[in-house]
Amino acid sequence: MTDKLLVILQIAGRRCALSALDVRSVIETGAITPIPRAPAWIAGITALRSQALTVIDCRRAIGVAGDWPTDHRAAVITEGGHSYALLVDGIEDITTAAGEVGQIPGGFGAEWSRIALGMIETMAGPALLIDLPALLAGPEDIEAAA
């Protein structure tokens, strides 16, 4: 993973990373149209150059509560043939990995462990490397597990 380009972003106050190859663009979030009966982590849909994007609220998809400041930008990604706009707190930079992916240190919680491939050292500091399919799947249904 050394020398791999990463997009560094903030989600729920934590530094996270996505492979730059997964991020098609970064957009200012405009009007988001809610989708009736959609799961809570799907904020709605928006358009980018006449293409519909499903808008994912990353905080809700992870399952963390709270309010954090946001710069109203989203990372546009494609996964499984579908396009998504990931609502995040902010997008910091594009940088390179300075090491290999390691274990997630204790104290992050199960919700972060579920959506992260591990901790990676970058030129901007340590970040959680996000597992896109796990993030897009939304939070685990705690009631179903009970």
Image (cartoon, rainbow, N blue to C red):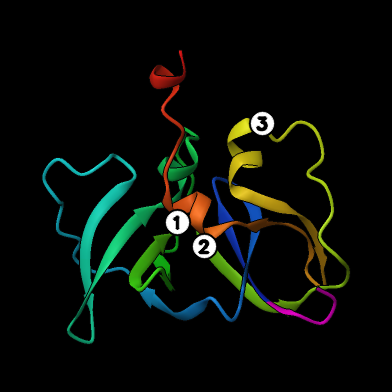
- The mark that comes first in sequence, 1 or 2, is 1
Q: Which residues are magenta?
A: 1-5
Q: Is residue 12 above or below residue 3?
A: above
> Foreground: 83 or 72?
83
Whether 140 is among the magenta residues is no
- The mark that comes first in sequence, 3 or 1, is 1
x 39%, y 17%: residue: 143
The picture places residue 20, in percent across and down from the top left corner, at: 60, 79
Q: Secondary structure at mark 1?
A: loop
Quadrant of the image containing the N terminus: bottom right
> Foreground: 37 or 31?
37
Q: Which mark is residue 70?
A: 1
Q: Which residue is mark 3?
A: 109
- Nearest to the eye among marks 2 and 3: give it: 3
- Nearest to the eye among marks 3 and 1: give it: 3
Q: Is residue 48 above or below residue 18?
A: below
Q: In the image, what residue type sits under mark 2?
A: Gly
For label 2, the crowd category at 10 Å Cα-Cα, with few meaning under 14, some 14 to 19 and many 20 or more, is many
x 27%, y 51%: residue: 43
Does 54 sit left or right of 136 as displayed? left
> Foreground: 69 or 81?
81
Q: In the image, what residue type sits under mark 3?
A: Gly
Q: In the image, what residue type sits under mark 1?
A: Thr
The Cα–Cα distance between marks 1 and 2, rounded to whole angstroms, is 6 Å
Q: Which mark is residue 90?
A: 2
Q: Are marks 1 and 2 in contact (CB under 8 Å)?
A: yes
